[in-house]
Amino acid sequence: MKFGFLTRIFALAGLALVAATPVHAQQQFINVLTGGTSGVYYPMGVALSQIYGKAMPNAKISVQATKASAENLNLLQAGRGEIGFTLGDALSDAWKGDEEAGFKAPLKKLRGVAGIYPNYIQIVASADSGIKTLADLKGKRISVGAPKSGTELNARAILKAAGLTYKDFAKVEYLPFGESVELMKNRQLDVTLQSAGLGVSSLRDLATSVKIVIVPIPSEVVLKVGDPAYQSGVVPANTYEGQSTNVATAYVQNFLVTHEGVPADTVYMMTKAMFTNTDQLVAAHAAAKSIRKEAATTGMPIPLHPGAEKYYREIGVIK
């Protein structure tokens, strides 16, 4: 009897100790969902993981290469990641539950963390292909990005606005950036469409191997997309080797997203750590130069996570 009584006392004491343990001292798991290793999301995600590791030493941080936007959002909805990169139009489609975009039902567990940098929709052809305009794409061989990726959704939207469908091409490949570039180098493709930050490594690599032409996307085509997520922009001269002039294009904002199941304290720390260490993100990729906390909530198509909102109120971005 006495032994049983003592056992119960020790068990209760153990429970009390667990209950008294601070939340921040418990093991946290943060899986950063990125994209293909030859894109911008992956190196930036690796840099983010390093920032989080220093800010939250009790957390176990991992980085996962994915097919980017649509896959990241579905993984977050399923609780299989804590933060992920996505394009703004894919995020809108996920919130609404656009099945054609890869979302069978509205993903209502998603919560916003930050608007980060714009993805420029870069249509790059080999000079030998003779492609100079969107109309010249007809009958050519193209890669439009991984299936249902943010890049592929951008491809569908821009090509449709230009009066083209996939049936208009001699061949359509659904490949990540690196594989698309390898086929371009081997003359097995004429053109690749890549939605990424300016100066993406895959296109820099391509431009040093073959002569390229960046195909302009005129502002009237951008307007025909009919989605405010798509804006007119410019690929500045000399972004890539052999590109001597500015080229008109379209861009879509990128966002960092989490889900409602991630604790507010964790999201607050992730948000604060990122904005106080943007220099490390810029070192990982020049696209991060566009990240500004003042614009972090602009155009966010889903509700903010309370942890991110707390940080923005703290610094005066939200009044």
Image (cartoon, grey):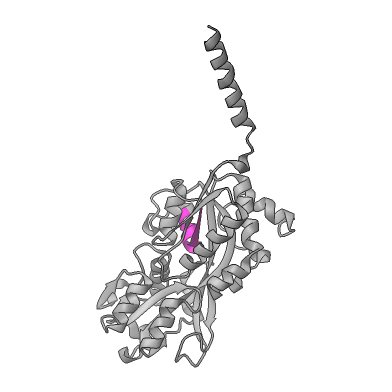
Please report the residue visible at 57 percent of the width from the left and 54 percent of the height from the top: 112
Residue 44 makes an appearance in the image: yes
Magenta stretch encompasses residue 106:
no
| Camera-nearest residue between 31 and 166 | 31
User: Residue 19, how many percent across, how many down?
Assistant: 61, 30
Quadrant for the C terminus in the image: bottom right
Please report the residue visible at 36 percent of the width from the left and 84 percent of the height from the top: 125
Q: Which residue, as the protein is rendered here, is positioned at the far front?
A: 3
Q: Is residue 311 left or right of residue 216?
A: right
Compared with 150, 103 (above or below) is above
Quarter of the figure with residue 47: bottom right
Magenta stretch encompasses residue 90:
yes
Give the magenta range: 83-94
Q: Is residue 166 left or right of residue 53?
A: left
Quarter of the figure with residue 174: bottom left
Q: Which residue, as the protein is rendered here, is positioned at the far top?
A: 1
Compared with 132, 227 (above or below) is above
| Camera-nearest residue between 256 and 63 | 63
Q: Is residue 277 left or right of residue 48?
A: right
User: Residue 271, how many percent across, how many down?
Assistant: 62, 56
